[in-house]
Amino acid sequence: MKSKKLIATKTLIPKESLEQKILLIRGKKVMLDRDLAQLYGVETKQLKRAVKRNLSRFPNHFMFELNTIEHQSLRSHFGTLKTGQHSKYLPYVFTEHDILMLSSVINNEKAIQINIKIMETFIKLREMLASHKDLKYKIESLEKKYDHQFKVVFETIKRLIDPPLEPKEPIGFHANKPIPRIKKRKIKNDN
């Protein structure tokens, strides 16, 4: 029975859609309350109510309410929203740590399976970030190592592409410029 539920969960939520729901707000990777509620199959107000009943599990630095500016920025990011489709209240966002707690607050099998998928997605994003940092470090070390050699090569290439221009004399008659005299050559007679 569990294997059928697990298979159903895998087919319902592709990892790509989870990655799109993870946002970077205040320097933290978070998910919106409405997205989590949708994934868990509950209403947003039920999710918020469950969180408020268990506030001791959700410290302020992990879960926070967006301010008006952040909310407006988020609304413009997602384009025009249909009237009545979205809450008139400022949304809460949850970090990875809070999402772990949500499965214990929303006590159903679907929430547990969804949390596993969300955690896998957060781990994948963290690994991608780490590999990018490693690559950036390697590139920077190569730049430092070969900086002088590349500088010489690039300067040479620039000179070949754009050689310095020799000053050209303007075309036409110039009254102030002396006229060069042409010397006549004497022709020798071989007589």
Image: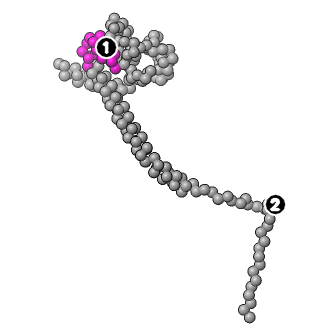
Residue drawn at x 39%, y 12% as measured from the top left: 60
- Residue 14, horizontal then vertical, whole percent: 31, 27
Residue drawn at x 30%, y 17% as measured from the top left: 100
Q: Can residue 16 be seen in this view?
A: no
Q: What residue type is labelled 1?
A: Leu
Location of residue 184 (image quadrant) = bottom right
Q: Earlier in the sequence, mark 1 or mark 2?
A: 1
Residue at the left extreme of this rendering: 1
Residue drawn at x 43%, y 44% as measured from the top left: 144
- Residue 89, horizontal then vertical, whole percent: 45, 10
- Residue 12, horizontal then vertical, whole percent: 29, 23
Numbered label tally: 2
Q: Nearer the viewer, residue 146 or 97?
A: 146
Q: What range is drawn magenta here?
A: 96-114
Residue at the right extreme of this rendering: 175
Query: Which residue in the protein does label 2 denote?
Result: 176
- Residue 84, horizontal then vertical, whole percent: 46, 12
Seen in the image, is 82 located left or right of residue 4?
Answer: right
Residue at the top extreme of this rendering: 53
- Compared with residue 150, is residue 41 higher up or lower down, i.e. above or below? above
Badge 1: residue crowd in 10 Å (few <14, some 14–19, many ≥20): many
- Compared with residue 13, is residue 55 higher up or lower down, i.e. above or below? above
Q: Nearer the viewer, residue 12 or 133?
A: 133
Helix, strand or loop at mark 1: helix
Residue 102: image tag: 1
Q: Can residue 62 be seen in this view?
A: yes
